């Protein structure tokens, strides 16, 4: 058999198999990349992280977001997607490491810092005595109390309530701290089903300590603007107060205040940290 007549068909067959294998490998890899991208975007949507771009090469993902903190949070979510080997975070200025300072995490350059004076307004109003209590009776009305004796006996409800002891306040605070975190629908003051159940639990605790007065504090995470977070935290605190009143708690025992993102429990470096900072607290008043 002549080798020259056999060799060309063999070469053509080998080259054809190589090309077919290359096409199959390329198609298979593109299918994997498309699948990982789709599942990564679904995971980001479930985590309420919008506007994040995910580019998958092989099994490695580049995650790009509008802010450094969102980039880190999104990268953490994408890293947990099954099949993703590595995920790198990119912010507006390029690659992002895991070290974000408090100033970056909590305030944007355009948002004002909260002023400490806001915390002093709630209690001052209650301390101002009513001028009516010190006004002397007029001369012409001196005989009126003797004619209308029942009115003297009626104001029993105006007698000062018994103040709880320090031990009672401590016990109430300990019980309130044990209550799980109250959850809301994303970006709203609407309670979730679980959130409503926790508020009922809080009402039961407050009913067990009828003398204590409580301030309801709303706190948000650091995503979004400072002003929007402050307003959202106020609405959430007010919603919890209204729900407690509906459940039979005396409104005179309750006050509500929103602190927005100004008082975080931890510096947010993960999605779990944001959940920790997003909370409602019950603070027993002295």
Image: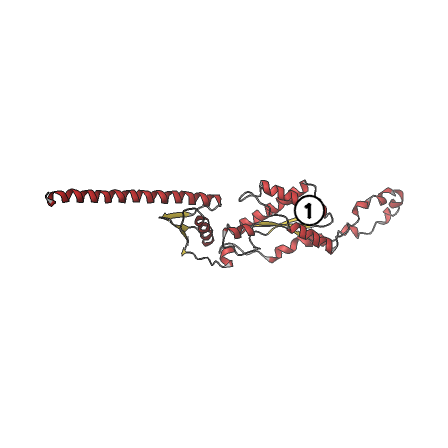
Q: How is the image coloured?
A: secondary structure
Measured as percent of width and height from the top left, residue 168 is found at 73, 53
Please tell me which residue is depicted at 46% across the width and 43% down the height of the picture: 45
Between 232 and 127, the residue placed more toward the observer is: 232
Q: Examine the image and state in which quarter residue 238 appears.
A: top right
Residue 225 shows in this picture: no
Could you tell whether 49 is left or right of 131 in the image?
left
- Quadrant location, the N terminus: top left
Measured as percent of width and height from the top left, residue 134 is found at 79, 53
Q: Residues within 10 Å of mark 1 (few under 14, many from 20)?
A: some
Q: Examine the image and state in which quarter residue 156 appears.
A: top right
Q: Which residue is mark 1?
A: 205
The residue sitting at the front extreme is: 1
Measured as percent of width and height from the top left, residue 41 is found at 43, 44
The residue sitting at the left extreme is: 2
Residue 101 shows in this picture: yes
Measured as percent of width and height from the top left, residue 273 is found at 53, 53
Between 90 and 123, the residue placed more toward the observer is: 90
Between 282 and 223, the residue placed more toward the observer is: 282
Count the numbered circles shown. 1
Q: Secondary structure at mark 1?
A: helix
- Quadrant location, the C terminus: bottom right
């Amino acid at each position: 058999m002549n080798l020259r007549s056999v060799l060309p068909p063999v070469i053509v067959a080998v080259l054809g198999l190589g090309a077919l294998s290359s096409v199959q490998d390329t198609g298979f890899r593109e299918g994997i990349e498309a699948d990982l991208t789709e599942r990564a975007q679904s995971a980001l949507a479930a985590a309420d992280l919008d506007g994040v771009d995910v580019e998958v090469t092989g099994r490695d993902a580049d995650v790009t977001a509008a802010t450094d903190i969102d980039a880190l949070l999104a990268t953490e979510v994408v890293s947990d997607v099954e099949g993703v080997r590595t995920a790198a975070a990119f912010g507006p200025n390029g690659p992002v490491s895991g070290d974000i300072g408090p100033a970056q995490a909590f305030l944007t350059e355009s948002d004002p810092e909260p002023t400490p004076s806001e915390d002093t307004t709630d209690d001052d109003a209650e301390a101002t005595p009513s001028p009516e209590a010190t006004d002397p009776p007029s001369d012409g009305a001196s005989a009126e109390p003797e004619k209308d004796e029942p009115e003297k006996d009626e104001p029993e409800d105006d007698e000062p309530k018994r103040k709880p002891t320090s031990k009672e306040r401590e016990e109430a605070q300990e019980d309130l701290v044990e209550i799980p975190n109250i959850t809301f629908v994303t970006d709203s003051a609407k309670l979730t089903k679980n959130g409503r159940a926790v508020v009922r639990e809080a009402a039961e605790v407050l009913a067990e300590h009828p003398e204590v007065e409580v301030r309801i504090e709303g706190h948000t995470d650091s995503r979004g603007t400072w002003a929007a977070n402050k307003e959202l935290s106020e609405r959430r605190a007010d919603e919890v107060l209204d729900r407690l009143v509906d459940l039979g708690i005396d409104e005179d025992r309750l006050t509500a205040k929103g602190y927005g993102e100004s008082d975080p429990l931890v510096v947010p470096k993960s999605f779990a940290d944001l959940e920790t900072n997003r909370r409602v607290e019950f603070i027993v008043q002295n």
